[in-house]
Image (cartoon, rainbow, N blue to C red):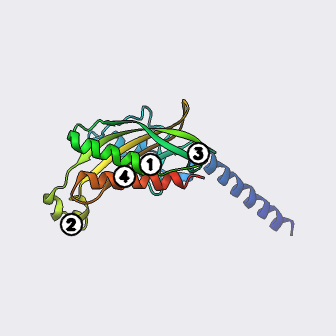
Amino acid sequence: MRVIVFKSAVYMIVFCLAMLHSVQNGFCGKDRFVETDEYKGKEFHKGCIADYKSLVEGDDLKWVWVAQDSKIGEHSLIVTSFKDLSGELRKSQLSEVKEMFTEILGKIKGGKATLKAEICIYEVQKFSQGKAWIPFAGGHQMQAGVGAELILRDGNKVVALIRHFAREGVRVEDAAQEVADDMKKFLKDQK
């Protein structure tokens, strides 16, 4: 009887230590952006986020970091800075994309203080009919794609970092709307 109790206690201790180890290593096994081929590769597009070390793989967004207990969804949001670092957008496209992000993210209305969003477009991929031949993925890969980064501040304190890329439709503006919608959904859910 004592052997069974001892074995059970040992198993419980090992289980608790394993759980503690996974919590201490953060995000329970989620990939870190700085450890990926995307970050290390020669095709890496730098955005406006200065340090990517804290970004981890998100569920609905590609790469995210949110300060603990920030409850972003309870705040309002305003876009204070918008840049095109890709160099691929025409002035008319840039104006439309900026207005789209401002409108979509401006729909986050909470009762707490207003958070300030700095956004940059780091990559633009135009619609490419030639990619249609790619087996199993061509229909998706040929769509326009936009990559954007968002830095969210409460005063001077950074409360969230997001790096996200999405594809949608034929126009770059369609892909940008998809990115903005994905960001809005994620931020509103942070309560």
* First-in-chain label (3 vs 2): 3
* First-in-chain label (2 vs 1): 1
Q: Which amino acid type corresponds to the residue marked 3 in the rendered image?
A: Asn
At label 3, counting other C-alpha atoms closer than 10 Å, the crowd grade (few under 14, some 14-19, many 20 or more) is few
Looking at the image, which residue is at 21% across and 66% down?
Answer: 135
| SS for callout 2 | loop
The residue under label 1 is 105
The residue under label 3 is 25
Q: Which amino acid type corresponds to the residue marked 2 in the rendered image?
A: Pro
Q: Are marks 2 and 1 in contact (CB under 8 Å)?
A: no
* First-in-chain label (1 vs 4): 1
Q: Residue furthest top?
A: 156
Marks 4/2: CA–CA distance: 25 Å
Residue 163, image x and y in percent? 40, 45
Looking at the image, which residue is at 52% across and 53% down?
Answer: 188
Q: Which amino acid type corresponds to the residue marked 1 in the rendered image?
A: Leu
| SS for callout 1 | helix
| SS for callout 4 | helix
At label 1, counting other C-alpha atoms closer than 10 Å, the crowd grade (few under 14, some 14-19, many 20 or more) is many
The residue under label 4 is 179
* First-in-chain label (4 vs 2): 2
The residue under label 2 is 135
Residue 126, image x and y in percent? 20, 51
State which mark lies toward you, 2 or 1: 1
* Lateral position of residue 106 relative to residue 100, left or right: right
